[in-house]
Image: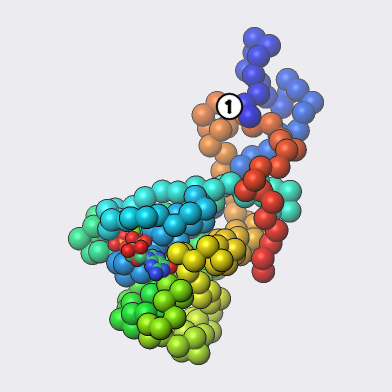
């Protein structure tokens, strides 16, 4: 809610009301084409499974405002392209100032799991600091009969790379809480990193946000980890 009225620009000096800055966490979602990156980000930000998706070209941005321990935080999700030809001009942008990384594989496709090594190398090659939290997501767990990547193998890989493992399904509505947990877990970890700079888009645009005490539907999340 923008503060306004009164003939002068609103600001802390013109009101006794408390003001907050909104932190934005940039989280990129990386992995082979067709593993379900678009569906996972859609599930988290929109709450549904998209009927039909097409290969992502470049990047699609999705955003969700969450509340963690009383602070409203914008989770800005970068849904990246898995196909080389649709991503090569964008790779630098993906990794610039990234706050957290989600590596996704398809539990029904072993190559998408073995290719994770390549995705991690790409990430490391872009000087992403070791402190940037990373998680591993095995998607399409609803396809139980077709699973190729055993949980034990994925867990070993996750441990070796110091990542948490989430096995889930963007499609199965019963798993939606688990999908939520992936991003909320990262947001909680980032919130705990006090060194992150506050970014305040509204302030840059000449507007100032007032502290809102009302909770929105997205804001009822508590820290899952
Ligand atoms: N059964 C099942 N299918 C899924 C799931 N998630 C995604 N899919 C399907 O997998 C296909 C690819 O999904 P996308 O989300 O477009 O894949 P992507 O990783 O974004 O692919 P790129 O944009 O090319 O990198 C689509 O047909 C989805 O319907 C899931 O959890 N379960
Ligand atoms: Mg996509």
Quadrant housing the N terminus: top right
Residue 121: % across, % down: 36, 75
Q: Residue at x 40, y 54 (%)?
A: 50
- Above or below, 29 relative to 145: above
Q: Identify the residue at horizontal 46%, vertical 64% (top origin).
A: 170
Q: Position of residue 57 (x, y in %)?
A: 27, 53
- Is 106 positioned to the left or the right of 159 in the image? left
| Residue 129 makes an appearance in the image | no
Q: Which residue is the extreme one toward the right? A: 16
Element on which disc 1 rests: loop
Q: Nearer the viewer, residue 54 or 98?
A: 54
Location of residue 180 with respect to 122 vertically, above or below: above
The residue lying at 53 percent from left, 62 percent from top is 173
Tell whether 199 sits left or right of 37.
right
In the image, 107 versus 135, the foreground residue is 107
Q: Position of residue 193 (x, y in %)?
A: 64, 60
Q: Which residue has dot 1 on it?
A: 207
């Amino acid at each position: 809610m923008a503060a306004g009225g009164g003939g002068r620009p609103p600001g802390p000096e013109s009101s006794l009301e408390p003001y907050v800055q909104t932190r934005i966490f940039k989280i990129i979602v990386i992995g082979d084409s067709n593993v379900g990156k678009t569906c996972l980000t859609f599930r988290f930000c929109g709450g549904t499974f998209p009927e039909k998706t097409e290969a992502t070209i470049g990047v699609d941005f999705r955003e969700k405002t969450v509340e963690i321990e009383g602070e409203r935080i914008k989770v800005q999700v970068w849904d990246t392209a898995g196909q080389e030809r649709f991503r090569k001009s964008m790779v630098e942008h993906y990794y610039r100032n990234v706050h957290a990384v989600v590596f996704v594989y398809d539990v029904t496709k072993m190559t998408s799991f073995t290719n994770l090594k390549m995705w991690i190398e790409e990430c490391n090659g872009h000087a992403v600091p070791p402190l940037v939290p990373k998680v591993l997501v095995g998607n399409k767990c609803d396809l139980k009969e077709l699973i190729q990547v055993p949980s034990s193998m994925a867990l070993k890989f996750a441990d070796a790379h110091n990542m948490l493992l989430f096995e889930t399904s963007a499609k199965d509505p019963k798993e939606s809480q688990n999908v939520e947990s992936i991003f909320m877990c990262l947001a909680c970890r980032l919130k705990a990193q006090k060194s992150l700079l506050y970014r305040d888009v509204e302030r840059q645009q000449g507007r100032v946000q007032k502290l809102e005490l009302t909770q929105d539907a997205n804001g009822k999340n508590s820290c899952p980890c």
